[in-house]
Image: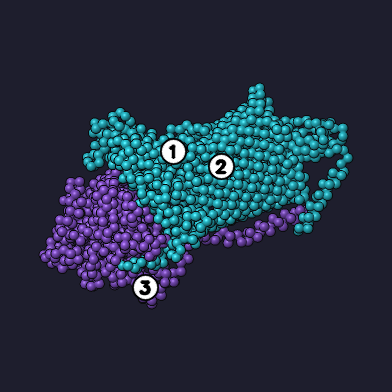
Amino acid sequence: MKNKLLTFAIVAMMSCISGVVRAQNRTVTGKITNEQGTPLVATIAPKTTSNVATSSDESGLYSLSVPETVDSLIVNSIGYMTKTVVIRNNVADVQLQVDGNYNLDEVVVIGYGTQRKGDLTAPVATVNMENALKRTVSTPMDALQGAVTGVQIISSGAPGTTPTVRIRGVGSFNNESPLYVVDGMFMDNIDFLNPNDIADMSVLKDASGAAIYGVRAANGVIIVTTKRGSLNMKTKVTYNGYAGLHTPTNVLKMASGQQYADYAIAVGNKNIVDNSVSKFGGQDGRPTTNTDWYGELLRSNALIHNHNLDVQGGSEKISYSFGINYLDQDGIMDTENYHRKYNIRSQTEARVASWLKIGFTAHLNNFNAFAPNNAAFRQAYFASPLYPSYDPSLELADPIKFGSSTTLGMPSGFWFNNPLATAYYNHNETKGFQVLPSAYVEAEFWKKKLTFRSQLSQRYQSTHNIQYTPVYYIDNDQRSQRSYLRSAQARNNNYILDNLLTYRDETGKHHWSVLLGQSTREERWRETWVSANDVPQSEEFWYVGQGAQGTGSATGYGEGGFRNAGISFFTRGTYDFDNKYLLTATFRADGSSKYQTKWGYFPSLGIGWVLSREKFMENQSLFDLLKLRGSWGLLGNDGIQPNAGYAIVNSGNNFSGIFGSVGENNGVRVPGYRVGRFFTQVRWEVVEEWDAGLDFALLNNRLNGTVDYYYRKTKDLAFSRPIPFMWDRVYGNWGSVANSGWEIGLDWKDQVGQLDYNIGANITTLKNKVTDIGALANIMNGFPEWSAEFPARIEANQPINYYYGYEVAGVYQNTAEINSDPIATRYNQENPNSPILPGYLRYKDQNENGELDEADRINLGNYLPKLTYGFNVGLNYKNFDFSVAFQGVAGNKIHNLNRAMRRKYPQMNADAAFMEGLWNGEGSSNTYPSAAGSVAAWNLQASSFFVENGAYLRIQNMQLGYNFRVRESIPVRIFATADRPAIFTRYNGFTPEVSGMGFDSNVYPISSTYSLGLNVTF
Amino acid sequence: MKNLKYILISGFIGIAALHSSCEKFLDKPLENQQRSEEIDYSDLSLMYAPVSGVYRAAADDNLVHWIDLSIRCMRDDDFQQAAPNPNDNPELMGIKNFQNDVTIQSYWGLNQSWISYYSLAISVNNALMELDEFEKNIPSGNTEQLALNRQYKAEVRFLRAYAHLLASRIFGDVPILSDSGDIARLTTIGKSTVTQVREFIIDEMNACILDLEDARPNQSKHLGAVTKYSALLLKAKAAADLAANNNSSPYWDQVLEATDLIIDSEKFSLYGDYYNLFKRPGKLSNESLFELQYSDFGLATGDIVRPGVDWGTFFRWQGPSGNQRGSAISGAGWIPPSQNIVDFLNDRGDALRLKTTILEYGASEDTYAETPDGDRVYGNPFGIKYFNGKTYLPVDQMTEGRIEYGANNNVRILRYSDVLLLNAEAKVRKGQDGDAPFNLVRDRADLELLSNVTLEQILDERRAEFACEWWGERFNDLIRTGRAQQVFGSKFVPGQSEYVPIPQTQIDANSNFR
């Protein structure tokens, strides 16, 4: 086999050489690209005669032998303006400009292949990587915020955290995030990539596009192709980098010391104020202490810098690309925390023979992250401003004299610890690396018609996490008597083997292609951890063996792991007639080890009609393109928990009772186990999706747009639902949910004198509705730990997980209002010890029975935005360019859980707006309760008081660039960027971007980034 | 076409190779998740394992959770309040004031209590299914193993019955969850009346008594497991609840009969040192009928089995709050004893029980009081004067190096003194002489002996003997004897104030709880 291949290679090379030798005339070579540098297939002919015309290959390369007399060539490519070039030096690289009348020949990356954009029947969004690169973000998906229709990205702002990505609403609880396919490897996120590594990103949103990924496609698919070189490409070296500062922005203003003191007195905790005055100064009721916990906890500026060096090139047989980049980002908490990573990427493709390509791509990621203890932010939200951050009078505090809330007579421990101490006594460092090698063979057995490709993609990841707590003392609850070390190592080991056979052919105006494929994959994860007390403080001794010498059982250990496997067979057929009538059909059979039903089948069908190519459209000049599309298909989701399907045995030390703890004896464990009996037979979660779309180009291609209507219904929606009697939830296929809406994207591009400008806008609407929850009347859900007090509810014909509670109709302003209200009168009669007072919330009696009861609870709104939008403006004037991007959402609600937590923690601080809004006398407020009322159970019920409008508009990115050339061949661009400089919202929290069900417990401030950057190519 | 060969070769080799092993490739069980089917039920040495698992569930959380504890006993007049700051969890003050409306109904703590007790019942149901599997593997002639199988089942059924007793004493009419194999049943099961729950307990105990070990718990094969006598006492308690204040109720016969059986076994005796009964030397004494066991295995650090989460264990939750300057004698300061119980004990000259039950804080945050064992307790910022001495474990009894309050102590639930006092009460109610059992209890408490004891004297003795214990015994005594309004005044409305409402979130999940 090897020998034969070698023979083939030699023969192929010989034939190439002989071709050169035979040349009598002069040979012109070159490369045809579009403005973006993407290679194009074009016909190249001498100006004087067309007998010797040739065409460029898929890398855009051509070679043409022409008589010496010919001095120029004509280059022609569908969708581009014809160009005449003069031949100099026998090399003619040609850049074609898009023909205003036609831009359909662009090749788009789709599942397991590529397709002409003009032939697509699916709405495939290609991400403008140039715009994405303008954003100074640490993860690539953050750069897409507000940029792509149908894609909602929710970013918490904390460094190194994965943003929530939703494509076309929520169709699953198991895994909202789409499938990422990075050079063929399936990934759950692409945080490890640097945006600079990416050449191409395609978002497959509908069934026609995504169903080829079968069981992983339900949440949409994002195909990422990293940068690669092309044949006969002059080596191109690019440096792109920036350095900047990020600074906390929109930091929620917390109540001041005086506000807190007034509040504490009003709710009957004057002792707290008195303690502050007597210990830290002030006069009666006016303590001088005013600790700004967020101010103390935050850095005003944290450094971020990112450097990227990219080399691409190619010879006749080999193309390569090599990239290295480094990101260093400090966190905004004023303590040790950072996120550093470097990536090395290498891609090589060799044309072994004219029909045989082999390639190898490898990504090496290395990262080191020091995670802050974000509990400190929660504590900063709760902490009273009336005690100092450092308190030298605390004799026992050691080694640092941190202040303690116990000095005020407040509890410490739990969320009332000193936030600075929590931040300081933290060491949580993760180091890791990941290697993603991928090798492929591609054989073109029948020129341009039949190709076989086999690719093995692997992922090896290894991480090591070390957590260490030193010995310290602040107060009785906030202390660590013994040092503690936990060391955990985890390994991921995945592979995918893909085998693809592609057949493409045409006769006359009929074009068709068939893809047959098979894929095998396996994912393994395993974690091992060990822990010990009494480990010395010096980092060199952080090995569990150094701990608790002599008391062997002081150490702990554990292991976790899983294995999932899948096998798939898939096919796709496309057919078009004259690029006018389009048809795409796909089918995938997926086998997964996670399900009791092993096999699932996922078909899809897409059709398209390019009206603008019809005769009857020939004589109009308005539309340059008009295309109708429609698709249907089934998609699967295997993000489901794999542990369903049988009773699980829990055994070991934590499930063994103690016996013999008699008198002075220490008890011992008698081995025990418990069985988790509640399980259901879980079926495949299947999404059925319909899509109808329209692509158009108007007014000489100045206006481009696409409009889609989608309807996706998730059947057998699998999730854990609460059951009576236990905290355990039972996992099963409990319902169906439908998401539908419109996606509209518009781009306008024109030129006024020397000013080029473009304006883009995208809008996505979403209507979410639960269609079925079986025999159940409803399912109560909610934020873990708070679901009993502040439930979310699932009910048929309503949006999923709406907030469920009482509607606030106002605030009782005076006793007369209370006495005239049946609810209040009745309540006060029954509860003379805790009556409703003026300044209490008035709930609407929905069933008008004169009593506040369970039937008065209603739908208070839902977390899914009805509208997601983005728009951007780009300007180009001479050497300057400027761009600005906005994004926002509307029509969603947020449950301000931070405020609602007062139900369990009445002594917590509050945001300044809350304090200022409190009712303090007749007519002062009709929305906020009084201070005393704010801690009364009556006002802490699930109600519309805690549900706020979640709409926002944000300036996502602004960038000003200046272009010049050091030398003719060395273009340089310098740029200044402001990322997330401003947000407009009425929401009373740190950020209106709340993931999950919209219960906002986020206390992490987001940050703006201001940076300067440089881009050089040579 | 030569090339075609390669297609076929390379393509099919790959696919065929994988496809042949395909089914096995997908059909592997999950890793690191042991299936119940893989338990070797024929290995009878494992038969106690599901039972041990249930004891652990009870000890971990189900019977000792800090908020359950607070709700369960706070209504007693033995306790001043729940949280040291009454603004903390304001619903708790509402519950103490017998408030009953929607604001209480949505209180998370009630939901936690409900779930704690019923999770234990479900753990028991699951363990019984396991024991059934073992039973199938016991040859019919092996009477010894069959008896053990029945004994083990009876042990967990005792725990299930006790969980139902607690649930019903708090929530009133509650479901009897004796079968939870089917999830659908959980969302449809209805409530049973208070009486039906007690009758269920009595029936269960009647069945269990036959199968349980005839031994004192600290003599049991699994040291500290419940025995026949634990079941007899639980039966007596359920019967006493049903007998209520009706002296002619036939249930008093059951109380008398059950307690007589325990007394006549002569296996039990009161622990001589009432003060140390609740401390390390008194763990699983000859007085204990049901106790949750814990251990720190004598280690200063590392492995420990404790009642609840580390910051909120049964003991720490009741330990003295305030700045205790690093002392192990510290905690959250919840459910402080009331002045009422202090006065009560003082007034009756009950010095030993006062010393044991009530410990004092320092007068201010900068001064300390000393415990009888010489540990210092500084004052707290809430102006709370007392903390519960029955959860106090002196530093010199702790494993050296540990600083966790109460570590390595057990949680006492049922004691022989309860048997004696119920026995005395049944006798007196039936017109017999209850002096003998009654005076055993008094004698141990260093009190003078009484003769011709009355019901009032017995009820007072019950209050003093079980003062500030954690099972709501005092409140239950007031309810069953109809004396609640007398004690709590008009805020207690008979027929309304006995129970807290079933949590709204449970009703939302099963409308039959409405």
Q: Is residue A648 left or right of residue B387?
A: right
Q: Count of labels shown?
A: 3
The residue carrying mark 1 is A295
The numbered disc on residue A38 is: none
Question: In the rendered structure, the residue with mark 1 lies on which chain?
Answer: A
**Mark 2: amino acid:** Ser
Residue depth check, mark 3 versus mark 1: number of the one nearer the observer = 1
The numbered mark 3 sits on a residue in which chain? Answer: B
Q: Is residue B473 visible?
A: no
The secondary structure type at the circle numbered 1 is helix
Pointers 2 and 1 in contact (C-beta within 8 Å):
no
- In terms of depth relative to the viewer, which is nearer, A209 or A489? A489
- Earlier in the chain: of badge 2 and badge 1, it is 2
Label 2 and label 1 in one chain: yes
Q: Which quadrant of the structure image shows residue A749?
A: top right
Residue where numbered disc 3 is placed: B146
Q: Nearer the viewer, residue B260 or A87?
A: A87
Q: Mark 1 is on which residue type?
A: Gly
- Residue furthest to the left in view is B452
Residue found at the very far top of the displayed protein? A753
Residue A292 x, y percent position in the rendering:
40, 38
Per the rendering, the mark at residue A138 is 2
Whole-number angstrom distance, CA of label 2 to CA of label 3: 65 Å
Helix, strand or loop for disc 2: loop
